[in-house]
Amino acid sequence: MSEAPQIDIDYVARLARVELSPEEKVTYSAQLADILGYFDKLNAVDVDGIEPSAHPFHVVNVWAEDVPGECLPKEEAIRHAAKTKDEQVMVPKVVGDA
Amino acid sequence: MSESLFYKSATELSSLLQSGALSSVELTRAFIERTQAVEPSVKAFLQQNVEEALAMASESDFRRSRGQSLGPLDGIPVAIKDVISVKGASLSCGSRMLSHFVSPYDAHAAELLKAAGAVLWGRLNMDEFAMGSSTENSAFQTTSNPWNTDCIPGGSSGGSAAAVAAGESPLTLGTDTGGSIRQPAALCGVVGLKPTYGLVSRYGMVAYASSLEQIGPFGRTVADVAMLLQAIAGHDRRDSTSYKVDIPDYTAALQAPAKKWRLGIPKEYFAEGLDPEVRQAVRNAIEFYRAQGCEIVDVSLPHAELAIPVYYIIATAEASSNLARFDGVRYSYRSPNATDVVSLYSKSRGEGFGSEVKRRIILGTYVLSSGYYDAYYLRAQKVRTLIRDDFMKAYEQVDAILTPTSPTPAFKLGERKEDPLSMYLADIYTISANLAGIPGISIPCGFSSENLPLGLQILGKPYDEAGIMAVAHAFEQAHDFHKRYPSL
Amino acid sequence: MQYEAVIGLEVHVQLKTVTKIFSRVPYTYGAPVNTLIDPVVLSLPGTLPVINKAAIDKMITMGLMFDCRIADICKWDRKNYWYPDSPKNYQISQYDQPLCIGGQVEVELPGSGRNVMGEHKFVELTRIHLEEDPGKLTHFKDYSLIDDNRTGVALAEIVTEPCLRSSDEAVAFLKALVINLSSAGVSDCDMEKGQLRCDANVSVRPVGDSTFGIRTEMKNLNSFSNVKAAIEYEIKRQVRLCQEGKKQEIVQETRRWNADKGYSISMRSKEDSHDYRYFPDPDLMPVKVDEAWKADLKEKLPERPYDRQRRYMDELGLPYTAASVLIQSLEFGDFFDRAVAVSGKAKECANFIVNDLMRELAAAGAEGEGSLPLHQCRLTPNHIGELVQLIDQGTISKQIAQDIFSEMFAEGKMPSLIVQEKGLKQENNSEELEKICAEVIAADAVAVEKFKSGNEKAINAFKGPIMKATRGKANPQVVDELLRKLLAQQ
């Protein structure tokens, strides 16, 4: 990655489900190329044998016992939805992948 | 109401309430009036719940009259960044996506504040979903720096810092993912603290980058911040990353006699790009500590310059997934132009998110996508380990580390908006603490020639908030930067 | 050319926990829509998951049942994909560090007849991991509705190696899962309630080939018969295409099985291959499993059902027909074991449980609910054990035992008490019996003639009236001896 990679902006935007205008695509492509170029600094580091950190501290076995707690009233499931029917959120018919 | 009241520290106000010299209703009214007067030029608030606040204040007065005060925070107004959930209040996160969302539940921090009797009275402006360093990324309004309204207040908790600086609220809560409490605190001349990762529950804080962020307090003084942190710190079983640790008495720790601390100065934080006035102010602070008999030690954090790429890979990757729930289906903005489910997602998100959020989602999606994971995300996580190890090694030699908070004083509104990379560099001194999970505090340490506040950052060992606050308090006691007020 | 099928299954099993996997909302099947929710289930902004320890316990138990290697440490990953049944648009799952690795499931293939045990073999597992169930979408003509009741229910995904060769093996595997997992209390595995859902990957290849053909995937097969029919259809379809030289028409795709019409169709082909962007979930901490935890759960494991079947047949001498029924649930097997412990008579206990008890339970079940659950009836293993003992000791006849059975099922009284209360004790007093026998012989001269002329069966003509006269209490063996003695004197 010595040369800044070009993001396939159409592919990534589709993967992220974000519709971008043609102008946004141009601007973002250039800005992201800049940023990715800056990320190249990382390649200079030797990370052989280094454990990745998903969290700042290593803690294990944080869990809850299987005891019921409070529920929300069913109205909260649809309270902020743009479209509802029969106490459920309504979406255009889902065919195959979404 | 006199000007001295809204510029008093929360600690002083708390004494006035406890002595009966002042009622919470009077106090709350004073802040409401002050806010009405200055808000048109500051624009820190997205919402002010005046009636609710007065009702809470009157309940507080009632409790106190019966000798049932809930403690030092009882009756003190606290305003909250609009990313922390309060039952029945808005939770817009500065985004069009959630402009109509009303939360049905309390964040752990909000529960604790209510239990302490605090008067929760407003929702504060922020960069959309906490992404930004200037609060210019809010979908609703631009907050100004009270010291110069042509300047940014910092971000993403710009509203929280500006509200304290402008005397609109004695205490506020913000969140810090990469410097979002400390950097605006520095630029607005107030005190802001990012706790150790896990000290304050994240339950009810809308996630931007889960492994990095914490809720934290803003106040006029270190003691104010200690008082507010005392109320919100502690284990919560609803946050798996919340840490079980004994919480010390932070206020008492400040009153302990000053110690001869060993303070580390990392050379990497005084390199190219640091404004000379900031450098001088921090140097003066270091000399102050030396004069107090502290041992000043040169330390090295060799991977410091990698913090920005590591941060922007990890944070955007987590964000790309955390923000997927804002999809136009259940509770977020739904585009009226959708024809099928795919376009419902894409159009709602294209229209509902602002440009910085979209940029980070695209970046985060890209670094996680097939074929790039190892090169970016995995490598960033490994370098994160190195960055943390640097700090742990330094802490074998020193009790705390002193650095500038921000490389520059507040810059002008609009100045960096079109150049994301230069905006990202504003966080260069703060983000390492988030990657390492350690606590950090920013306190005022001087003013620029243009009368803009400058901040000193003190970074501590994990869970040593008491330690860094004591170091900060010692400086504050000997200086009067925190007693200067902007003219509004 | 001869072709063989290569089948791998991915089975989702709902774990039998009280609350959901990452929130403390209790789950019950059939609740009114959107009532089993809280801020975490809806994934409202700011909410966080906390893992349910019971779900991990069940997973480890399952892994131990199937001899999987239990990971020392496992972590949680986000599988990012877009679908309205998932409020977060990612599923918390386990990607490269599942909790259970490898393992095998013993299965029993169908025998040559109903009463004949089929071949047993082992199906190799690839892995079992824990994840969250999405919500339920109901599709209408031009819209879909979302019910979040099921959202976040604890789900185990069991993945087999592509080692199955027929639809029978696939069904046998699922049946083995059902009896193993229900016995261990891991899952109720009720397919009608969606507690066990099966995806099947099918390919074919010429017999003798070691490479795999192109596979297709059939999703959400929700009954044994659908699994069987869908796999058979797919094998035939692929073999036919191969034989017709149209092998290239077999493409990697997902097919939907139409159970009513008995065929599958290709679902819309995917525009992009899936890019799930897996990464470790920063909201959850890893789980570390130590030896003590495993040992504790291992101690609580039930006897494996097919081990139990072997024990019943080899050691207790039960016929396959009885043993195979008793192992269908842990409850019946344990009930049987305790009854045998009381009476020492395995076959007799098995008969009462498999025939009488199951018949009564079926009759006692509420309308449309199937049989009455065993733990809800008033019979205990002591009842059966004592009843068998009473017969064995000659206290009651088998015939009387039938009457006692119905009464003790209804009333819950011990059989000895019923015998006492109703005076059902078998009549062994030969003096009195001899008198009755003599009277009955005297009353039926025709039968006496028939018997004397060599018709053995004619003796039965006397037995009915004798039983009637003694109200069934006469010991049939004693009666038979007396009759022969008296008839010989005629």
Image (cartoon, coloured by chain):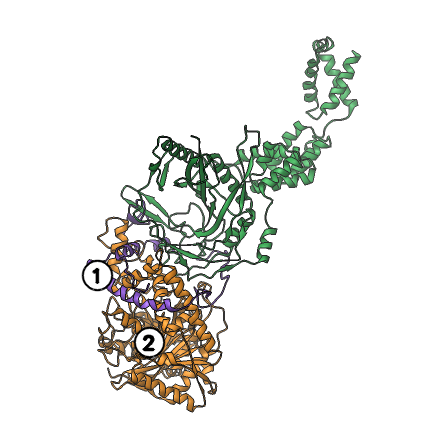
Chain colours: A purple, B orange, C green
Please name the residue that numbered disc 2 is placed on. B183
> Of residues C79 and B115, which is closer to you in this image?
C79
Residue B406 % position (x, y) = 32, 78
Which sits in the foreground, C86 or C109? C109
Identify the residue at the far left of this view: A23
Residue at 48%, 74% (x, y): give it. B247
Query: Residue B81 appears at what percent x and percent y?
Result: 33, 70
Position of residue A20 relative to residue C357, above or below, is below
Name the residue type under label 2.
Gln
Which chain is mark 1 on?
A
Residue found at x 34% / y 37%: C248
User: Which label lies toward us, 1 or 2?
Assistant: 1
Disc 2 residue crowd, few under 14, some 14–19, many 20+, Cα 10 Å: many
Q: Amino acid at mark 1?
A: Val
Q: Is residue B154 at all visible to an observer of this figure?
A: yes
Query: Of helix, strand and loop, which one carries label 1?
Result: helix
Secondary structure beneath label 2: helix
Q: Relative to C435, is A22 on the left or the right?
A: left
Residue for badge 1: A26
Q: Quadrant of the C terminus of chain C?
A: top right
Residue beneath the point at 25% across and 60% down: B352
In three-dimensional space, the C-alpha distance between marks 1 and 2, rounded to whole angstroms, equals: 31 Å
The quadrant in which the N terminus of chain C is found is top left
Where is residue B302 drawn, in percent x and y?
41, 75
In x, y percent, where is residue C435?
A: 77, 19
Q: Height in image: B110 above or below C164? A: below
Q: Is residue B72 visible?
A: no
Would you place residue C416 above or below residue B136 in this image? above
In which chain is the residue bearing label 2? B
